[in-house]
Image (spheres, grey):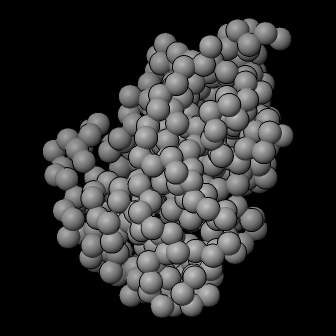
């Protein structure tokens, strides 16, 4: 099948089952959309055709860009290297504060301007000098089949794979997906069911299950990001509860990123997150035992740098996405005291810096 034909085709999927009333239930995520013939799920890209669930965006993207890996954000995975980033359209959450809403909320197939087979994407990553490829901008859960095929093609060329996701996925597709993923950033949007229900249209518990699954049943390197929204998920009590849960269930080595909110989508009346809130949250997390806690979306060199958990010496100093100094030995240990810094590190850091390079595939 030609690449162009793939774009125009409805791609078969496996995670669904028929209901007694004639509808088809999609089983990719806990939303469990129940669809009549011709209907689409809330994600918009999985549809009921011929009494089956199909993926309508296989091989199509809303764009490709080479980013610093730290932008995902991942601070302990191949620091300083470039990552080929892409997404499709739609999303299985309904976040009122979405900061990629033009992609994730898109209902226009014209959004998917670029086309690429998995093999082509892998080759582009190699030619571009990227060490990894990231499924991002919208959630790869909803383009599961395309993401898995891209990941397999990339591994054949020695390219690693990164998932930037809300972690809202059912058990069986989760198992298949993470067999092919090297690193992930999980968006833990808050630590209350109220927030998840009213601001994202989803539930907290499945996300916590994904985090525990990654920690205890896979070798995937993962980090966590929480966007702090003033008055919604930034209270001292909530940050205390969340970071205590992370410590008790995932351990002290999982990096946690607190990032600043800016008014967007349906929450334009909420102010930007004060730097003081980010700093306070970082202090709470570290008090509760987390060793690697970062601040993002604002300029904070200390909050963006990595320090040895034992001697507190700077291991990787960062100025935004630019690496300033490197004090890790070849084995990923502190060159001052020998303490291991968990993550995926190479002998030398990358030198990509803060560049963001949009590309078109021809």
User: 246 or 232, which lies in front?
Assistant: 246
> In this rendering, would 185 be left or right of 154?
left
User: 107 or 262, which lies in front?
Assistant: 262
Whole-percent x and y of residue 156?
A: 83, 40
Above or below residue 254? Residue 37 is: above
Q: Residue at x 54, y 28 (%)?
A: 64
Looking at the rendered image, the quarter that the C terminus falls into is: top right
Q: How many marks?
A: 0
Q: Is residue 210 visible?
A: no
- Quarter holding residue 318: bottom left
Q: Is residue 45 visible?
A: yes
> In this rendering, would 88 be left or right of 10?
left
Whole-percent x and y of residue 309?
A: 50, 85
Looking at the rendered image, the quarter that the N terminus falls into is: top right
Whole-percent x and y of residue 186?
A: 54, 57
Above or below residue 60? Residue 240 is: below
Q: Residue at x 65, y 45 (%)?
A: 132
Above or below residue 9? Residue 165 is: below
User: 39 or 314, which lies in front?
Assistant: 314
- Quarter holding residue 314: bottom left
> In this rendering, would 340 be left or right of 298?
right
Q: Residue at x 35, y 59 (%)?
A: 319
Q: Residue at x 27, y 73 (%)?
A: 279
User: 112 or 86, which lies in front?
Assistant: 86
Whole-percent x and y of residue 298?
A: 27, 57
> In this rendering, would 323 be left or right of 186?
left
């Amino acid at each position: 099948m030609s690449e162009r034909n793939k774009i125009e085709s409805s791609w078969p999927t496996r995670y669904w089952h028929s209901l007694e009333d004639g509808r088809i239930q999609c089983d990719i995520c806990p939303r469990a959309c129940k669809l009549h013939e011709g209907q689409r799920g809330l994600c918009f890209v999985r549809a009921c055709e011929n009494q089956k669930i199909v993926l309508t965006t296989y091989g199509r993207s809303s764009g490709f860009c080479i980013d610093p890996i730290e932008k995902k954000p991942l601070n302990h995975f191949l620091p300083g290297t470039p990552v080929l980033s892409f997404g499709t359209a739609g999303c299985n959450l309904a976040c009122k504060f979405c900061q990629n809403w033009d992609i994730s909320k898109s209902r226009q197939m014209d959004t998917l301007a670029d086309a690429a087979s998995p093999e082509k994407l892998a080759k582009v990553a190699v030619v571009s000098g990227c060490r990894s490829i990231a499924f991002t901008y919208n959630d790869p859960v909803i383009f599961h089949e395309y993401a898995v095929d891209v990941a397999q093609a990339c591994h054949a060329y020695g390219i690693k794979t990164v998932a930037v996701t809300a972690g809202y996925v059912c058990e069986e597709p989760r198992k298949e997906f993470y067999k092919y993923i090297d690193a992930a950033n999980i968006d833990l949007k808050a630590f209350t069911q109220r927030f998840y229900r009213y601001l994202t249209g989803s539930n907290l518990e499945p996300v916590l299950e994904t985090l525990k699954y990654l920690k205890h049943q896979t070798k995937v390197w993962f980090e966590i990001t929480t966007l702090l929204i003033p008055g919604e998920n930034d209270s001292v009590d909530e940050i205390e509860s969340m970071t205590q849960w992370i410590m008790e269930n995932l351990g002290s080595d999982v990096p946690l990123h607190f990032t600043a909110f800016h008014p967007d989508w349906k929450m334009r009346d909420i102010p930007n997150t004060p730097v003081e809130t980010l700093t306070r949250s970082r202090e709470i997390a570290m008090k509760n035992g987390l060793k690697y806690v970062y601040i993002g979306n604002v300029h904070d060199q200390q909050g963006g740098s990595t320090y040895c958990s034992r001697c507190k010496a700077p291991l990787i100093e960062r100025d935004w996405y630019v690496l300033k100094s490197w004090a890790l030995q070849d084995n990923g240990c502190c060159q001052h005291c020998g303490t291991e810094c968990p993550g995926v590190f190479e002998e030398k850091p990358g030198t990509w810096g803060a560049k963001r390079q949009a590309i078109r595939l021809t």
